[in-house]
Amino acid sequence: MKVIYFARVREQLGVDEETLTCPAGVSTLAGLVDWLAAERGAPWDKVLQAPDLICAVNQEVVDRQVAVSDQDEVAFFPPVTGG
């Protein structure tokens, strides 16, 4: 699985992208977020579990209940504002 971090998320975590293998038992985006937060601790837990974090799987914005697999591209980015 390719995981990409954009903008403020990238800056807060200090990584722009990485390749991961989904651990056993992780089948949803929520599960992936929970696993990353638990495995890596601060600041990952705060950044990835923020309620306004936007998530995309295979370049489509999704909710956290969507299924994920090792073949997916997952992206995390902060909310976009405009005017």
Image (spheres, grey):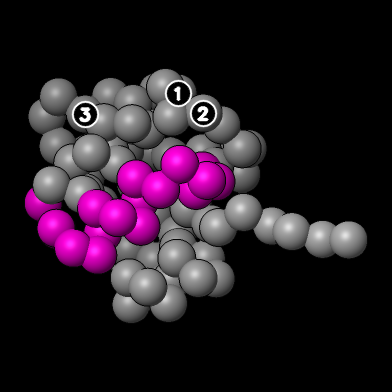
Label 2: state its secondary structure.
Answer: loop
> Residue, x 42% and y 22% (percent of image)?
65
Q: Which mark is residue 31?
A: none
Nearer to us in this view, 58 or 10: 10
Residue for badge 2: 63
Q: Quadrant of residue 42?
A: bottom left
Q: Which mark is residue 26?
A: 3
Residue at the extreme right = 83
Could you tell me if the residues under marks 3 and 2 are in contact, i.e. CB atoms within 8 Å?
no
Label 1: state its secondary structure.
Answer: loop
Q: CA distance from mark 3 to mark 2?
A: 15 Å
Nearer to us in this view, 70 or 68: 68
Residue for badge 1: 66
Position of residue 82 in the picture relative to residue 51 (left or right): right
Q: Which residues are magenta?
A: 39-55
Q: Is residue 69 above or below residue 2?
A: above
Does any portion of residue 73 appear in the rendered image? no
Q: Nearer the viewer, mark 2 or mark 1?
A: 2
> Residue, x 45% and y 23% (percent of image)?
66
Residue 63 falls inside the magenta stretch: no
Residue 28 image position (x, y, % from top left): 33, 26
Q: Nearer the viewer, mark 3 or mark 2?
A: 2
Of the residues shown, which amino acid type is indicated by label 2? Answer: Asp
Residue 3 image position (x, y, % from top left): 39, 54
Of the residues shown, which amino acid type is indicated by label 1? Answer: Val
Of the residues shown, which amino acid type is indicated by label 3? Answer: Val
Residue 33 image position (x, y, % from top left): 30, 41
Count neighbours of disc 1 (C-alpha within 10 A) and say few if under 14, some if 14 to 19, many if 20 or more. Answer: few
Does any portion of residue 36 appear in the rendered image? yes
